[in-house]
Amino acid sequence: MSPPRHSTLLQRFWQRLRPHLSTIALAVMVFTGVHLWQTRDMPAGPAPELAFTLITPDGARTATTLAQWRTQYPGQPVAIHVWAEWCPICQAEEHNVHRLVAGYPVLTIAMQSGPADTVAKVLRQRQLPWQTAVDDTGALAQALGVKAVPAFLVVDAQGQLRGASVGYTSEIGMRWRLWWARVF
């Protein structure tokens, strides 16, 4: 009697994968090291109190604070995505944020992208339905400890900054950070 077909396929898979395990482990370690180095200065602890002009997807503008914005989402973590209109990596990441916005509360911060009129124009041109805080001087990003864009942070239900990443973040990475902040 011969072994089941799926058993044979699994054995072949492991035989082909085994010589590459050290390369995969090295790649994971390098990726993890780069991520830790990029986020080494990102703050943890309570989210700072930020005051800003918020541009909503319908184009309305209101003056608000991070704490006031978060009250719309009681008991759940929220994402903060810091981007700039001049940043090519931010543009490459737009589709990830766009899909995330459909299911999670996301506040984007347009760092050093000009005044509210300019940011609103960019949002319209790129068809980005985001709630966006205008940070024309970079002060909001600085208060969050963000020194480079794009950056992604999570504020958990207790108001603590968690799950920071700098540079391109995949949609799965964004969703994982929000899930982690909800569960742990």
Image (tube, rainbow, N blue to C red):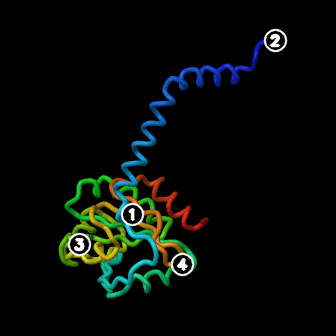
Which residue in the protein does label 4 denote? Answer: 158
Which residue is drawn at the image coordinates 48% and 53% (left, top)?
172
Mark-to-mark CA distance, 1 and 2: 55 Å
Classify residue 86 as left or right of residue 61.
Answer: left
Residue type marked 3: Val
Q: Earlier in the sequence, mark 4 or mark 1?
A: 1
Residue 116, image quadrant: bottom left
**Tag 4's secondary structure?**
loop
Residue type marked 4: Gln
Q: Are marks 4 and 1 in contact (CB under 8 Å)?
A: no
Mark in front: 2 vs 4: 4
Which residue in the protein does label 3 denote? Answer: 119
Q: Earlier in the sequence, mark 1 or mark 2?
A: 2
Which residue is drawn at the image coordinates 44% and 36% (left, top)?
26
Which residue in the protein does label 2 denote? Answer: 1
**Tag 2's secondary structure?**
loop
- Judged from this view, the residue extending furthest toward the top is 1
Q: Is residue 101 above or below residue 73?
A: above
Q: Nearer the viewer, residue 163 or 121?
A: 163
Classify residue 117 as left or right of residue 2.
Answer: left
Classify residue 31 as left or right of residue 75.
Answer: left
Q: Position of residue 38 (x, y in %)?
A: 34, 56
Mark-to-mark CA distance, 3 and 1: 19 Å
Mark-to-mark CA distance, 2 and 4: 60 Å
Which residue is drawn at the image coordinates 18% and 73% (left, top)?
114
Q: Nearer the viewer, residue 117 or 138?
A: 138
Which residue in the protein does label 1 denote? Answer: 152
Q: Earlier in the sequence, mark 2 or mark 3?
A: 2
